[in-house]
Image (cartoon, rainbow, N blue to C red):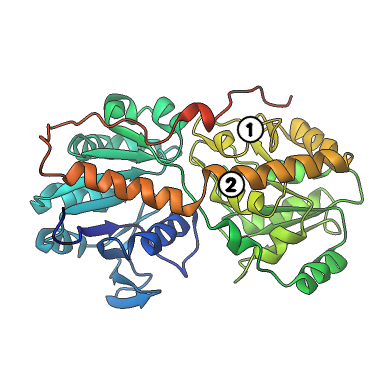
Amino acid sequence: MRSRKLKVLQIGKYYPPIRGGIETHLQALARGLNEEVDLEVVVANETQTDSVENIDGVAVRRLSTLGRVAGAPVSPGLFKVINQSTADLLHIHTPHPSALLAYLFSGFRGRFICTYHSDIVRQRFLGALIGPLQHRALSHADAIITATPQLARHSPVLARHRPRCVTIPFGIEPDAHEACDEAVVKEIRTRHGTPLLLALGRLVYYKGFEVLLRAMSQVRSNARLLIVGEGRLRPALEAEIARLDLSERVQLLGDLPDALPYFRACDLFVLPSTARSEAFGIVQLEAMACAKPVINTWLDSGVPFVSLNGQTGLTVPPGDSDALAGAINTLLEDDSLRRRYGQAARERVRTHFDVETMVSATLDLYHRVTDVRRPVVAQPRIQATMPMETLCTESRPVQ
């Protein structure tokens, strides 16, 4: 029997209220683990100052940041934090080159786990440059967590580390998506019109919003699209909306403090991502928890693992605006199909993507790699924590 709680140091890029898929996952995981382990979370600040906060009982330290590399912050203080840490286990969320570099040179003597969120796709030169660093760090990991089996199977980076890959799907709190003011939901539908499509994410290249805009030109004319999020591509998307004469049908809402009413108000959710940088799509879970069908894209990084083609929505080839428009029209023209997919989506979240399941599997993994009663080899072969045949169906995308 353990005489004390495990001491765990988690390192991520940022932490809410800064928004993002990794940030959402890190917060959900930290909240769930906080009562079970002695936890400290270390992330980057958006300024060149350090700060310490207590957020929902979780100790969060934000470190001064000099800039970004591959979308990840560079925080010189990470080396000192890891070097001085007395944690039993270090858990880093990647891609995060500066965190991996700090770990390699820190002399940290505890166990090491990495959650591998996605490959570095667009910055190929940078990916090649940091490749040796990444491989060296991953070779030291006692386990590498991926949220889908597809990412472990198809990532070129993980190919040589696959024996230590463990699939633990990301999770959310399904019940939290039931608590919403229906008057607000009704007001959104009245203000924007119906049928209502929703897309959400940073306005960056791999989200595929420009493909969605082209598809809207072929979608039935009474449909409206709301895109929630901000990013460097906003001017380009605004220009495309004007070029396609969609200003009456498409609105860019920017960042919202609470997107839940919009998930509840929409008729279907679209994730039109075009590159493997999109490796999961937690926003799919949020839509599915609200009983909304999802249209996603056939990316081998794992996106269609979340919402299943022909079961909880439709899957189309990435970058294909014609196929995307066809899928949207198919769902808009069949109310019963939308309801059937939506109900199946909600059930899938509750069955396979509940935050308690995610936290329990992660805690079990922590104990397995730190259990001093078991012999620990340099590269322990840890099997997936969940039966994959119950989680994923390989089916054809909608053409």
Q: Residue at x 10, y 34 (%)?
A: 375
393 up-or-down from 132: above or below: above
Residue positioned 27% across, 35% down in the render: 131
Q: Considering the numbered disc 1 on the image, is that residue within a helix, a strand or a loop? A: loop
Nearest the viewer among 200 and 336 is 336
Label 1 belongs to which residue?
Answer: 318
**Up-down: is 274 above or below 58?**
above
Tell which of 39 and 211 is nearer to you. 39
Q: CA distance from mark 2 to mark 1?
A: 24 Å
Give the quadrant of residue 39: bottom left
Q: Is residue 219 visible?
A: no
Of the residues shown, which amino acid type is indicated by label 1? Pro
| Position of the C terminus by quadrant | top right
Q: Quadrant of residue 67?
A: bottom left
Q: Amino acid at mark 2?
A: Val
Label 2: element kind: helix
Q: Which mark is residue 349?
A: 2
Residue 188 coordinates in the image, percent (x, y): 80, 67
Q: Which mark is residue 204?
A: none
Can you name the residue that lies furthest to the front here?
Answer: 1
N-terminal of the pair, mark 2 or mark 1, is 1
Residue 98 sits above or below residue 218 on the image: below
Q: Nearer the viewer, residue 80 or 353?
A: 353
Q: Position of residue 294 (x, y in %)?
A: 69, 43
